[in-house]
Image: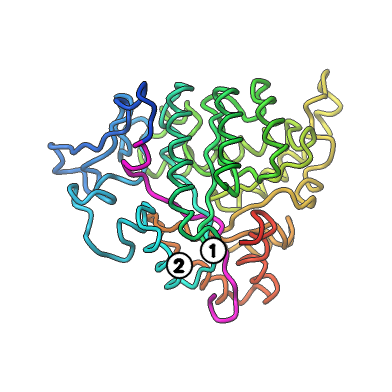
Amino acid sequence: MIGDYAVFDADAHAMMCPKMWEELPAAYAARRPRPVRIEDSADLGRWTNGWLIEGRLLPGPFGPGAQPGNEPKRVLREFGAPESGHFSIGSITLADPQARIRDLDEAGVDAQMLFPTTLYARMSAEAGFEAALFRCYNRYMARQCAFDSKRLKWGGLLPMRDAHQAFEAIEEMQKLGASAAVVFGTVGDRLLSHSSFLPIWEKFASTGLPLCVHMGMSYTPFEQICQNLFETHGIGMSLPAQLAFVALVGDGILDRFPSIKVAFLEFGAEWIFYMIGRLGHYLPIDRHDMPIKDSLPKRSIEEYLASGRLFVAAEAEDRLLSHELAMIGEDVIVCSSDIPHSEKRENSATKIIERTDLSDRQKRKILYDNTVRLFGTP
């Protein structure tokens, strides 16, 4: 707690590390992400190392597909990771869950939801390899979070490219104790509403788990558009939130599966204003003009937002936060630390508490109550 405020961090991370892939099936073991150094690195700043994944080096600072991410030197001592620091290697990779618990104690965080690094959005377009990587991650997180399952919660990656693998992953993550399932804004160049995914959503809806759409450059064409980190932050990693919103709300997935709750994480919350206005403007027009209307949402966009099934993670310094609370409701906005990524938002809960434009009731909902509504009581 911070003072008398309980804190349930809605979105933090376990950074990529080789231990996550130790259980890859033999058919994929040789293709595991491998840490590499760049010898000609004089003008690369911190980007002197990366993960070799299917012939690509991730992350990278410029050129098509430029993207930030957790480099090996943040998690491997032989690559220069510091022996000690604000967050230890064991804490940021969850190899030492007790170290993460100590970090939570220091930050005043009562419980924390853990998600994968955004690089998982681009690991592979091959269904089998992607599923193997995702499921290895899930097993790793289940083992590490079992150290303190009340404070360390995790979301399991859901492989969408292969329905059979998705079914098995859904059943497995339930058995392992996942608190949510994680997808990115698209599955490559397909929207989450693509007809091939409907059997997966039907299976998933029966679990009662929330669906978390996390930031990541999942939409394949963005890899060619984005040539530097600033473009990637503004386009490649951010716009998939809108693609997912159109797919899940606009294409009727929420109508078809009324038990599914959805959270949009690490995109900020400002984008929701644009989607409310844009989709709200065109929905009555398209209801009149579209020859086949089955895929259109049955209710207004505002009604879906008022249903309590759509959650959004806002930034602690969001200047529009009070307006977002008024627009989409006080019960569906959550706050996250993003620990231990470069934004350094580990003091986000303190920033929320210090704000003068929020009521005490609103602060308590954002910091704890709404995250409980989404993921359940820790």
Q: Is residue 81 above or below residue 163?
A: below
Q: Secondary structure at mark 2?
A: helix
Q: Do the residues under discs 2 and 1 have CB atoms within 8 angstroms? A: yes
Residue positioned most to the right: 288
Inspect the image, locate mark 1, and give the three-letter code of the amino acid beneath it.
Answer: Ala
Would you identify the image quadrant in which residue 377 lies?
bottom right
Residue depicted at 72% across the width and 45% down the height: 276
Label 2 – label 1 distance at C-alpha: 8 Å
Could you say where residue 3 lies in the image, as x and y percent from the top left? 55, 81
Would you identify the image quadrant in which residue 211 lies?
top right
| Quadrant containing the N terminus in the rendered view | bottom right
Q: Is residue 342 above or below residue 240?
A: below
Q: Which residue is mark 2?
A: 104
Tell me the tag on residue 111.
Answer: 1
Residue positioned most to the bottom: 3
Could you say where residue 197 lies in the image, as x and y percent from the top left? 64, 25
Span highlighted in magenta in the image = 1-22
Could you say where residue 267 lies in the image, as x and y percent from the top left? 54, 48
